[in-house]
Image: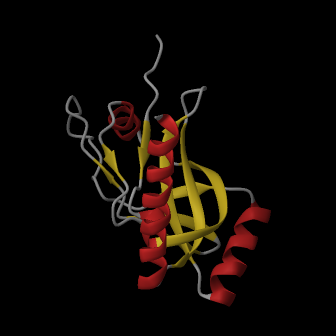
Amino acid sequence: MKQANIQIKNKRASFDYEFLDIYTAGIVLTGTEIKSIRHGKAGLVDSYCFFNAGELWIKNMNISEYSDGTYNNHQPRRERKLLLNKKELRKIERQVKETGLTIIPTKLFINERGLAKMVVAVAKGKKEYDKRQSIREKDDKRMMDRMFKK
């Protein structure tokens, strides 16, 4: 059975944050959660990552309840553990503690083996003038593309 390419993106993240380092992490899910993700019923809006006892967790990620789930359906906004190796975890934790950076989930996808993966970025918040600059660069790129297509 060929699976549709599921990619759920946090579109607001690249506008509000400047990404410094990007990591791909596994995510611990229950059976009904992975089924909902395969149907594309998940959202990364307002979600963020934090450390608890040396482990990386994601909070506020919404995975809608599975429609065919019974009494053992999952809670939509529960905290979920992210899986990275110890070296990466220590590096990220050091960056976040020392410099005041944050960890933002940017994309949730299903890999070729059928496993759910999360792309997280160590990011620095943008100021208002940085956001205006991003919009200006995007508009300029769009105009250049239009001019060269003619």
| Residue at 52% across, 58% down | 81
How is the structure coloured here? secondary structure
List the single residue furthest toward the right.
87
| Residue at 66% across, 56% down | 23
Which residue is nearer to you in this view: 130 or 102?
A: 130
Residue 109 higher or lower than 84, as above or below? above
Across and down, in percent, residue 26 comes to 59, 47
Across and down, in percent, residue 11 comes to 40, 56
Across and down, in percent, residue 27 comes to 53, 49
Which residue is nearer to you in this view: 93 or 16?
A: 16
| Residue at 34% across, 66% down | 46
The reply, left or right, for residue 86 in relation to residue 136 is right
Q: Quadrant of residue 139?
A: bottom left
| Residue at 44% across, 43% down | 146
Q: Quadrant of residue 115?
A: top right
The reply, left or right, for residue 36 in relation to residue 8 is left
Across and down, in percent, residue 20 comes to 66, 69
Q: How many marks?
A: 0
The reply, left or right, for residue 25 in relation to residue 48 is right
Residue 122 higher or lower than 29, as above or below? below
Which residue is nearer to you in this view: 87 or 104?
A: 104
Residue 93 higher or lower than 33, as above or below? below
Residue 107 higher or lower than 46, as above or below? above
Which residue is nearer to you in this view: 47 or 76?
A: 47
List the single residue furthest toward the top.
1
